Amino acid sequence: MTLWFVFALMTAAAVFAVLWPLGRGPRPHRQGSEAAVYKDQLAEVERDAAAGLIGTSEAVAARVEIGRRLLAADDAERELPAQSNIRLRRAVAVIALAGLPVLAVAFYLPLGSPTLLDFPLAERAKGSPASQPLDNLVAQVEAHLDNNPTDGRGWDVLAPVLAKLGRFDDAIKAYRNAILYAGDSASRRADLGEVIAIAAGNVITADAKAEFDRAVALNADDVKASYYLGIAAEQDGRASEAAAIWRALLAKAPQDAPWRPVVQAALARVGGSSAPALSNDAIAAAKDMSEGDRGAMIRGMVDRLATRLKQNGDDVEGWLRLVRAYMVMGERDKAKAAGADARQAVANDAERLRTLNEGLKNLGVDG
């Protein structure tokens, strides 16, 4: 309320300072005005002429000059504002003084928030989550969960954020609480196993593998759990088992699956003999071929792809297929060379180069 009073007082003072001159009347005329002086001068000229102190021609010239000045002074007095104009100016000043605050209030009431109370800075920060740092938002969610520990949805939201911040132990706890209070699911089990593995330096520990096994038991098609079970087999030295897991995963995957290059690179890493992606017709034709003929067919397809890319190097997906094929066939040097050629071909296109580098990284070809 005090703030309102101060603003009103400041507004009134500003308006009053501007409009005060409009309300002032004209200055009163002095009793000894110019017209009275000139009349006295005319009378004095007449006395001097009658007394013979000045000549007739000089008296006429003096009368003419004083008369001219008298007329000019009289005209100036007539041009002073009338009393009615003064009243109008005062009325305008009063209306402006009262009207400006009324107009301001009329605009503020529908557009402003006159009933909004004062808020400390901390309270205002709570009201604008989009502008807060991630750590502040996490602290608020954690404070909420301290008071509401059975809020499964809250734990489910908090867990991946904690993992992103590198707070893996807290993330593991959050995932376990999400499973406890929000329900068991393959995705939550797989996410939990992944965080346990990351916390252990990307080693699939017994605890992590147990979570992946539970995820697959809940959903045999869970991609993340199946991929990490292959990693577990690879780390245990069971390369053939890892390759079998990843082949099965690729067999069920759509051709445009975003994670497909990662699994194919992992398969190539363990020496899997999975062929590059072939069309359905080529796969059908290859069923009746011997191993040697099938390998020759695949080699021919790879060579044709390499020739086409030398002629048209803008096809980023084609380059990635070529690199992937070389990796699958165990020809890592050719894969690196193809990656270098691909970078050179799309060097002038920043977006294609970014996509290419991401794909090569997923395939394990960084050089």
Image (cartoon, rainbow, N blue to C red):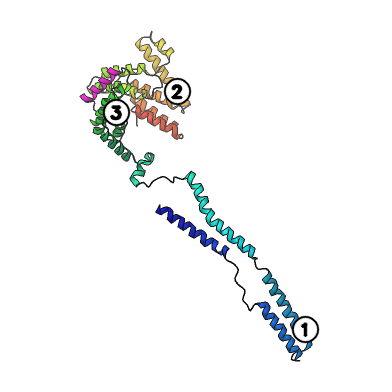
Q: Residue at x 27, y 25 (%)?
A: 179
**Label 2 secondary element:** helix
Label ID, residue 60: 1
Residue type at mark 3: give it. Answer: Gly
Q: Residue 364's spot in the image, x, y percent? A: 33, 28
Question: Is the residue under label 2 in contact with that under label 1 (CB below 8 Å)?
Answer: no
Q: Is residue 202 visible?
A: no
User: Residue placed farthest to the top in the image?
Assistant: 288
Q: Which residues are magenta?
A: 203-218
Residue type at mark 2: give it. Answer: Thr
Label ID, residue 139: none
Q: Earlier in the sequence, mark 1 or mark 3?
A: 1
Q: Earlier in the sequence, mark 3 or mark 2?
A: 3
Q: Which residue is mark 3?
A: 152
Q: Quadrant of residue 284?
A: top left
Q: Quadrant of residue 295?
A: top left
Position above or below: 76 against 115: below
Label 3: few (<14), some or many (≥20) within 10 Å? many
**Label 1 secondary element:** helix
Measured Cα–Cα span from mark 3 to mark 2: 55 Å
Residue 214 among magenta residues = yes
- Quick one: 246 or 23, which is closer to the camera? 23
- Quick one: 352 or 74, which is closer to the camera? 74
Q: Residue 102's spot in the image, x, y percent? A: 51, 51
Q: Which residue is mark 2?
A: 307
Residue 295 among magenta residues = no
